[in-house]
Amino acid sequence: MTALTDLISAGGGGSEINEIKFFTDRGSSFTDSNGQVWLKAGAKTVDVTTYPDADSGLTTLSFSSDYQAAESSSTSMNGKGLSLSSDNVWALNLDSGTQIRVTDLATGTVSHFTPYNGFNPAGVGYVKAAASSGLTTPLSNANGYFMGVLGGFNGTSLLSFHLIGGSGTDAGKSNGLQAWLVLRDPSGTGLNASPYNYTATTQPAAFHWNPATRYLYVMFASSTTRCHLFIYNMSGNDWGNINAGNGTSTQLNASSFIDWQTQSGANSIYHMSGSSTHLYVHYRNASYTRNIRKIPLSGNLSWASGTDVGTSNSGLLQNADGTFSTLNFRDYPVYYRTAGSTEKFLVHDNPNNKLHEITLDVPIIGQAAWDYRRAQTPYQRIK
């Protein structure tokens, strides 16, 4: 009868895939004399194609080939405000006080500015002009973009700012206040008035502009008490089409609105981003689990029409040498792009405040790290 020690010394013959055995340390992985592959506890691999029978879990992952900003784009993130231009040229986020930071995604360089004296932003984002021709001069100089900033100004307002054009270090930054939209619900009640009272800049606030349909989606939330989505039909307005407004204040009634807080039963709703087809809402459910809700723009925008795509407060960063380290999040992931059929998001890391591209729910193989004081190391057979 062959002893267990003989099996181990012979390279693990007779073992089953996913079985754990102890060896002297042989690196992150090794192949024994029987052709069986073993993965060290604490090491991980995302190669589920080569090892289809190995136990795997799901994690949020930033691959080594993913985008990573070269510089920090915040000094003290307040956990909201991150937004992207629809062609992924620039990223915007709120910083301490009234500062807004711009990251040039092509170069990773970061600049900052204050958009308007005395105005405290609650949410920020870019607007891409719907028209392809006939743009006003400031828009045509900035690839059809201008900036919008949500906050308190003559009521709850969305302010329009022209951008500095060109490709220099200031491109993407504000070039002065152009106009502002005073936001109201369908009946004409201001969003700063009862029953909404959306006035505090500490409240979650975000907007998404769809140039194809010329609809503006504005989300305000207030911790556990309420969250609304307001929809504005801008098809009869030059704002967002050929210009950034007429230079004056315009009261704007929503075409419809949805009480997401009541529909969802969520504990808290934090942030919203969007693509050409969906809204992505970062929230915490009644069990305090964080998720991203994907809601199609083509539907009725009810909470029930969406599905959860998953997220967490942290993930893993794949290093260039193939190892993995913990990636903690500073803020909430926002939609970035779709690569193939895979949705990608951007998030600031903690503590460096650098932007990372992440993928949700990536299958990954690997056991927890073992106590370093043990004389031998456990390995999982993965093939």
Image: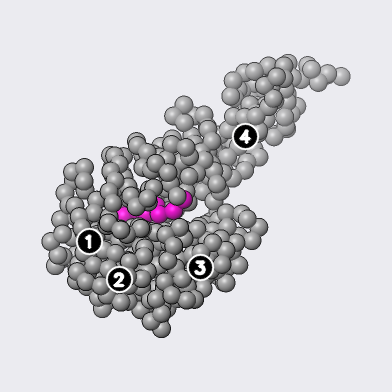
**Number of other residues with Cα within 10 Å of mark 2, as a class: few under 14, some 14 to 19, many 20 or more:** many
Residue 297 coordinates in the image, percent (x, y)? 42, 69
Q: Which residue is mark 1?
A: 177
Instruction: Indicate the position of residue 226 as horizontal and vertical percent values.
Output: 53, 68
Q: Amino acid at mark 4?
A: Gly
Q: Quadrant of residue 288?
A: bottom right
The answer to whether residue 132 is above or below residue 94 is below
Residue drawn at (79%, 17%) of the image: 5
Q: Are marks 2 and 4 in contact (CB under 8 Å)?
A: no
Q: Looking at the image, is mark 4 or mark 3 earlier in the sequence?
A: 3
The answer to which quarter of the image holds residue 354 is top left
Q: Amino acid at mark 3?
A: Cys
Q: Residue furthest right?
A: 1
Q: Which residues are magenta?
A: 79-85
Determine the secondary structure under disc 3: strand
**Spot occupied by residue 221 in the image (x, y as percentages of width and height):** 49, 64
Mark nearer the N terminus (2 vs 3): 2
Mark 3–mark 1 Cα distance, whole angstroms, equals 28 Å
Say which label, 4 or 1, has the lower sequence index.
1
Report which residue position mark 4 lands on: 366
Q: Reading the chain from its start, which is encountered first: label 3 or label 1?
A: 1
The amino acid sitting under disc 1 is: Leu
Badge 2 or badge 4: first in the primary sequence: 2
- Does the magenta stretch mainly form a helix, a strand or a loop? loop
Residue 71: image x %, image y %?
A: 35, 37
